[in-house]
Structures are given as C-alpha cells and as structure tokens.
Image: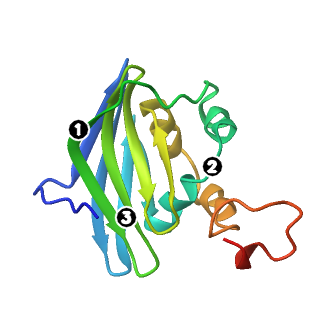
Amino acid sequence: MTTDTTNDPTITLRADDQAVSLTREPTPAGERLRVDSNGDTTRLDALALESLTWQDDEFFAELTGEEHTAGENVERTDESLQIGNEYTVVQLAVLDTDAGPRLVIDSPKLGYSCQLSVAELAALSRQEMDLFSDLLRTPLGPVDEEDEHPLFHH
C-alpha cells in the first residue's frame, strides 16, 4: 500500500483550459477528497470514491458528453494521495498519458480501479451527493442483474 508522505495534501491536474484541484481533508469520520473546478466543489469520502472504480466507460461518457478513454503510454508520477475511513481505503495517483493526465483511483480491498480525465473530474465536482448514493446501492462492486443475492457473491 502506498502512503502519501508529502506535506501538501493537494494535487492539481490540468488539460486544455480546465484545471481540477484535489485536496485531502481530514474529518472526524475519516478523510474526504475535495474536488474543486471552476468554482464547483464536492467532497467525497472513500466509499464514494470506491464506488467510481467499478463504473463502466458509458457512465463516465454520460458525465461529460465525451468518450471515456484511459490513455496509453502511461507513466506514473510521484503525486499520490490516500483517502480512508473505517470502511475502506482508496489510493489515488496521477498518471501522464498520451491522452493527457489521468487520476487513477484504486480500491485494493475490492480489486477495482479507474482512470479519470480532467474533464471527468471537473464533471464530478458539479455532482450532487445523490449520484454517489445511487452508486453505493451495490457497495461491493457491479452486480449481475439476474443475481438474487448480489451482496453474497463477490
């Protein structure tokens, strides 16, 4: 597990004319990731971040109106954060790709990860918490629509 050892809990990603700042904020119930872009802000706990890791490309394309691409020729930078609470821990790291910078969100506990573009992160900063509540209806990852007991088969 990689732990962020820097004194600065903020990462900024830039692409084209957009910038997104990601800041780790401690709270009594664990840490939150504050996502800021163009005056929009949301705060996500580790479970909300983890719920993003099992979403498909279509989910992210609907957020931005653009095709979701992970990017190729990936180089990991030394910028990273870890967000945790009593239920889970997610690891965040910045990747340089041929499609621009990406934030990888990794859930070691569940074995899922995703790569988000600056546009996707900016779109998340504008979302209401209802979106993340909906994603957490399946707290252990994607489910088979025909499975009668999805929480018992991960």
Q: Which residue is mark 1?
A: 77
User: How far across and down, in percent of the image, does residue 34 sit?
Assistant: 36, 54
User: How far across and down, in percent of the image, does residue 91 sit?
Assistant: 35, 58
Mark 1 is surrounded, within 10 Å at the Cα level, by few (under 14), some (14 to 19) or many (20 or more) other residues, namely few
Q: Which residue is mark 2?
A: 55
Residue type beneath disc 3: Arg
Q: Earlier in the sequence, mark 2 or mark 3?
A: 3
| Viewport quadrant of the C terminus | bottom right
Residue type beneath disc 1: Thr
Taking 81 as reference, is 86 left or right? right
Q: CA distance from mark 3 to mark 1?
A: 22 Å
Residues at marks 3 and 1 touching, judged by CB atoms closer than 8 Å: no
Q: Earlier in the sequence, mark 1 or mark 2?
A: 2
Q: Nearer the viewer, residue 99 or 61?
A: 99
Q: Earlier in the sequence, mark 3 or mark 1?
A: 3
Q: Secondary structure at mark 1?
A: strand
User: How far across and down, in percent of the image, does residue 81 sit?
Assistant: 27, 55
Q: Nearer the viewer, residue 119 or 80?
A: 80
Which residue is depicted at the point 35% across and 30% down? Answer: 74
Residue type beneath disc 2: Gln
Nearest-to-viewer mark from 2 and 3? 2
Q: Secondary structure at mark 3?
A: strand
64 relative to 41, above or below: above
Which residue is depicted at the point 25% across and 60% down? Answer: 2
> To which quarter of the image does residue 79 belong?
top left
Which residue is depicted at the point 45% across and 33% down? Answer: 117
| Viewport quadrant of the N terminus | bottom left
Q: Secondary structure at mark 2?
A: loop
Q: Which residue is mark 3?
A: 32
Q: CA distance from mark 1 to mark 2?
A: 24 Å
User: How far across and down, in percent of the image, does residue 142 sit?
Assistant: 69, 59
Q: Which mark is residue 106?
A: none
